[in-house]
Amino acid sequence: MATSTDVPNLKINSSRLMTSLHESCEFGKAHPYGTHETETGMARLALNDADKAVRKWYIQQAESLGCKITIDQMGNVFAVRPGKDSTAPPVMMGSHLDTQPTGGRYDGILGMLAGLEVLRTLHDSKYQSEGSIGVVNWTNEEGARFPIITVSSAVWSGALPIEAAWKCKEVTPSPDGNRYTMKEELERIGFMGHHPASYEAQPIAAHFELHIEQGPILEDERRKIGVVTGGQAYKWFEVVIKGRDSHAGTTPMAARKDSVLAAAKMIVESNKIAKAHSGLITTGIIEMEPGSVNTMAHTTRFTLDIRHPSDTVMAQIEDECRKRFSAIAADDSERGVSLEWRQLTANPAVTFHQDCISVIEQAAEDTTADLPRTSEDGKLWKHMVSGAGHDSFHTSRRCPTGMIFTPTRDGLSHTPTEYCSAEDCALGAQVLLGAVLRYDRLRAEMGLLTEK
Amino acid sequence: MATSTDVPNLKINSSRLMTSLHESCEFGKAHPYGTHETETGMARLALNDADKAVRKWYIQQAESLGCKITIDQMGNVFAVRPGKDSTAPPVMMGSHLDTQPTGGRYDGILGMLAGLEVLRTLHDSKYQSEGSIGVVNWTNEEGARFPIITVSSAVWSGALPIEAAWKCKEVTPSPDGNRYTMKEELERIGFMGHHPASYEAQPIAAHFELHIEQGPILEDERRKIGVVTGGQAYKWFEVVIKGRDSHAGTTPMAARKDSVLAAAKMIVESNKIAKAHSGLITTGIIEMEPGSVNTMAHTTRFTLDIRHPSDTVMAQIEDECRKRFSAIAADDSERGVSLEWRQLTANPAVTFHQDCISVIEQAAEDTTADLPRTSEDGKLWKHMVSGAGHDSFHTSRRCPTGMIFTPTRDGLSHTPTEYCSAEDCALGAQVLLGAVLRYDRLRAEMGLLTEK
C-alpha cells in the first residue's frame, strides 16, 4: 500500500463553487419548489438542448484555465490541465452534467463543479502538479433518457461496444413523436467527437469522483464525508409481456390474456423476492398498448432495477424472479401470456483501489480535523458502499478509482428537492482537492512520471 | 305488450352494405394484419381528422337519400328520412363511427352502415313509413380518446351536463403535446352544432341499435342473432396514487413510498375481488411520473373498469376494492402512499323496452326462418344481456330501446382482427329493417302518429 505524502495547503473557494454550481443549473432548471431562485430541480436529460448548452459553458470555463479539451465518440468531454509531465495519462476527476427528468442540482453536477473548482484553485495559485490533472464529463450517466446507465464510461472501459451505445433509443419519444438514438442526438448537438471512446486512446492515471450519497446514512449518523470502498452489483431489465387485446365488458375473466394483470403480479412478486434477500428491486416504468380504459392491453413492458452488494445473492434474486415470472405467465386460471426478458445493463459488485481509498481517507481526516465532533464516535468520515451506480464503477476496471460522498438531505435524490448544504459541498470539494494532490505526489514518488 | 303486425317484404342489399362498410373504413384504417385490402383494423379516434372525414362522407350519403341532417352541440349527427307524419319524433337506428386506437371494422361501424342500408332500401322502394325513420351517430361512444364512454348519448339523455362532457380531455396528448378537450376538438373539426344535445330538443320515438356481440356466445352456440334484453352495470374509475420519487439504488425498501408497487398490489387485488363475485374488472391504462428506470415514480394513475349484471353486486365489488386499496395504501411495511378515486363514468344495469324486444324477436324469427338449424336446440336467435356499454343504455332512459347482436369471430373485439362475416352482417341488417318497420306500424296502430 502506498504511503501518504505532504501536500501544499491549498483551499478551494466555497462561494465561487456554489455560484458556479447554480450558474450551471440555469441550463435545464425545472420543477420550482420554493421562492428562492435556486429552489428548483433540473430536467437536463442527456444530449438535449440544455445539456448542449451546459457542455459549451463548461468547456469555456475549463479553457479559460488553460485546459486542453478532448471530445470522444460518445461525447465524453475531457478537460486536462497539463502538469510538469504532460505526456503521462492525467489524474481525472469525473462525474456527469446530465440529470433525471425530475432531478436535482447536486447529483453529478456537484462532482463536475467541484472538479472545476479544484482546477481553478490550482490555476489561481499557479500550482504545478507533477502529472496532468483534469475533469471528465461522462455522457448520459443517468440512463434516464437513453436507458443504459453509465453508458459512456462503459464504452470507454470496453464493457460495451460503441455500436450498442450509439443505437440506444430514448425512452420517451421526442416532441416530434420520434425516438432518437444516442448517435443521432450526439450528432445533432455537435458532440460527436473524432477521438475513439476508449481507455486505450484516452488513458486515465486515476479517477476520483465526488458525489452526493443519495441515501440517508451520513445525515443520520451526523458525519460529513463517505470514503467509498466499492459499489453494489446492479442489473436493469425490460420485461415484455404479450397477451391479447379484447373487450373489458365481454371477455370472461377465464378467457383473458391480460398483459397488465400479469405485469402487476410480477411486480408484486419481485418486491417480495428482493425483500427476502435484503436486496433492492424497483419498477420505474410501465407502458402498455393500446392503452384504453375498456380494452385489455395486448402488450405491457416494465423495467426492473435489481441491486445487491453481493454478486452471488444478486444472481439468486434474478433467478427467483425469472422462475416466478414464468410461472405467472403460464398461469392457467387465465389463458396465459408470453414473457421476454431484455437485459439493459449489468454491473457486478465493485471494489475500489486501495491507493485511492487511502488518499481520500487522508484528505478527509485533514479536512474534518478542526470541525465539531457531531457523530457518536467522534469520527466525521466513514467507509461506505455505494448503493447507486456510478461511472467510477467502469473506470475502476481500467485505472485506480475512488469516490467521495457528501451528505444528502433526508437521503432524497432523483427529485427536485435533492439538497446538499453549501458547507457540505465545500467540504467535499476540499477532500477532492486533497485526494487528487496526494495522488499526484504519490505517483511521482512511485516513479510513474518522467522527470523534466 | 304490443302485438306484431305484418310488414312489407323488403330486402336489404347485402353486397351494397359490405361495399359501403369497407368504403367508410378507408377513413382511419390502420393495423393491417393480412394481404387483402380489407384486412386491416381501424384507428378512428373520436373527433380526429379521419372521424371528421367519415362524418362528412356519411352525411353526403344520407342527404342523397333525402334525409334531413341535424347536428347537436355534442356533434351527434341525426339523419332523418321523413314519414307520412313527419312531425312526430323519428324512430332512430343509432350507433357510432368512432373506434378504439387498435379497433376493428365492425364495432359501431356495422350499426351505422346497416342503418344507412335500411334507409337506402326504403328509398329504393319509395317506401312511405308511417312516421319518420333515421340514423344517429353518437360522438365518442368508445371513450377511448375522451375517457367517458357513451358520453354524447349521456348528455342527450340528461345523465351528464354538457359542460362536463365539453371539458373532458383526451387521454393521450396530441402530437403537439397538448391534451385537447372535446369542445376544442368539436370546434376544430366543424362539428359543434347549434342544436341543443337533449332528448327534449331532439326527441326520439324509439332507438334500435345493431351491434356485434363482442363476445363468444353466439359463435359458440352457432346462432345468428342476439335479441338483447338489457345490459350489465359498469363503472369506470381513475385511481391516483402519490408516493415519493427517490433513488432505486440508495433508498432502503422500508423507506420507500413506491406508487408503482402500490398500484400493482391494487390491480392484483381487484382481480381477485371481481372473480370472487363473478364480475369483470380490467385495468387498461397505467401511467407514472417521472418514468425512469432507477427512480421510483412519485405518481401512478391507473384505470379500473368494473362490470356486473346486478347493481347490488357491482356496488359490493366497488366497496371491497375501496377497502382493500385503502389498506394497501396504508401498508406500513413501507411508508405508505396517498390514494384518490376519481369516477369517470357510472351506468346502472339496464332493461330494454318490451315493445322493442318483441319487434326484434319477430324480425329475427322471420329472417332466420329458412336458414339451416345449426344450434343444438334449432333456434337461431337467443335472448342475451350486453356485456359492453352502448349508447342504447342511455337512450333507454328516454325512449323505448332495443338492441340486436351479430356473431363475433372468436369473441374478439377492440382489436384489428375483429370480424363478423358478410352473411352475418346482412342478417343483422335485415333484422334491423324488420324491427324498425314493425315498430313503425306498431306506433301507428297505437295511435301515436297523426293521420295525414
Image: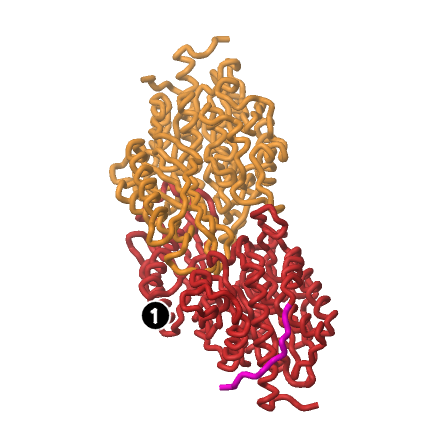
Chain colours: A orange, B red
- Label 1: which residue? B316
On screen, A410 above or below B183?
above
Q: Mark 1 belongs to which subunit?
A: B
Q: Nearer the viewer, residue B186 or B353?
A: B353
User: Is B259 inside the magenta-drawn segment?
Assistant: no
Query: Which residue is drawn at the image coordinates 37% and 18% (left, top)?
Result: A5
Q: As drawn, is B393 to the left or to the right of B294? A: right
Query: Which residue is drawn at the image coordinates 29% and 36% (left, top)?
Result: A316
Residue A159 figure quarter: top left
Query: Which residue is drawn at the image coordinates 40% and 46% (left, top)?
Result: A283
Q: Is residue B258 visible?
A: no
On screen, A236 above or below B232?
above
Residue A147 locus on image (x, y percent): 48, 38
Residue B439 figure quarter: bottom right
Number of marks present in the image shown: 1
Query: Which residue is drawn at the image coordinates 31% and 44% (left, top)?
Result: A324
Q: Main secondary structure of the magenta part?
A: loop
Q: As drawn, is B123 to the left or to the right of A276? A: right
Residue A364 locus on image (x, y percent): 36, 30
Label 1 sits on what residue type?
Answer: Gln
Q: Nearer the viewer, residue A166 or B425?
A: B425
On screen, A35 above or below B452?
above
Q: As drawn, is A216 to the left or to the right of B355? A: left
Specify the segment rendered in magenta: B1-12
Q: Is residue A103 visible?
A: yes
Q: Residue furthest left?
A: A377
Q: Nearer the viewer, residue A199 or A421?
A: A199
Residue A199 locus on image (x, y percent): 48, 20
Element under label 1? helix
Q: As drawn, is B244 to the left or to the right of B154? A: left
Residue B341 locus on image (x, y percent): 42, 64
On screen, A410 above or below A110?
below
